[in-house]
Image (tube, grey):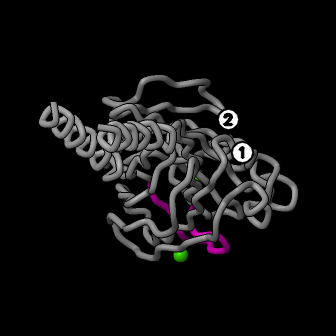
Amino acid sequence: MRISKLALAVALAMVFSSLAAATTITFNLESTTQLISTSGTGFGNTFTYQAGGLTVIVSAFGSTGPGGALQTAQLQRFSGGLGVCNQSEGLHCPTGPHAVDNMGGSTDFLLFRFNLPVDPLSIRLGYDGGDMGVSYWIGSQTNPAVAGSTPSQFGALGFGPQFVDLGDSIRTFNVQGGAGFSMLVAARLGDSDDAFKVQTLTVNVIPEPATLALVGTALVGLGLIRRKR
Ligand SMILES: [Ca+2]
Ligand SMILES: [Ca+2]
């Protein structure tokens, strides 16, 4: 009896530690392998990817509204990754410019929304658009209303500080900041010569508190039973 309880406790502890260790998932955004659905085809369309129980809905925006407010844009998928055609670039959407760029007076954004809390680890840019500066923000909301907002209002939508990664080459860079349910990735804010596509996004799935609490309660329960004997 004691051995089986011990075995159970060890098993639960292993489950606990594997949950606590978090699962690393890489979304290959240029491929259709993890693409489970799409919604719409014009401005405001979405792509949904799924891998290992984690789902991410991707949508596109451009700072084409009044005062630079974000408006829906067209999300496009290429061999180099995801790009954006915004409402200023709209006439040319069938042929370009397809990159996530900040040229021509407007800045493109990709919004990633996850069904579980994640800690974004790294991003690979798969298309060389010359200068490739990136601005990004990690947010606490599952569905932040970025349309109609300017970057100065991102904080009110649950986004943390802006981080910037500079470079002029195809590369994988480490994502700073903490965990969240959403992430915005843009061509470098305030600049005008950056263009890239987002090829992969790697995240750690944060263990759900409810699951951890359940396992924790089970472990405590075992402890109580042992004390009684
Ligand atoms: Ca663009
Ligand atoms: Ca730049």
Q: Position of residue 155 (x, y in %)?
A: 74, 63
Residue 22 can be seen, yes or no: yes
- Image quarter of the C terminus: top left
Residue 25 can be seen, yes or no: no
Q: Residues within 10 Å of mark 1 (few under 14, many from 20)?
A: many
Residue farthest to the right, as pictured = 66
Residue 75 image-quadrant placement:
top right
Q: Which span is picked out in magenta?
A: 186-197
Q: Nearer the viewer, residue 39 or 3?
A: 3
Type of amino acid under label 1:
Gln
Can you tell which mark lies on residue 87?
1
**SS for tag 1?**
loop
| Tag 2–tag 1 contact (CB < 8 Å) | yes
Type of amino acid under label 2:
Phe
Whether residue 125 is in magenta: the answer is no
In this figure, which residue is indicated by the disc labeled 2? 43
Which is more foreground, mark 2 or mark 1?
2
Residue at position x 44%, y 56% in the image: 120
Whether residue 194 is in magenta: the answer is yes
Residue at position x 33%, y 64% in the image: 172
**SS for tag 2?**
loop
Can you tell which mark lies on residue 182?
none
Question: Gap in Å between the C-alphas at discs 2 and 1?
Answer: 8 Å
Q: Position of residue 127 (x, y in %)?
A: 37, 56
Q: Residues within 10 Å of mark 2 (few under 14, many from 20)?
A: many
Q: Nearer the viewer, residue 94 or 200?
A: 200
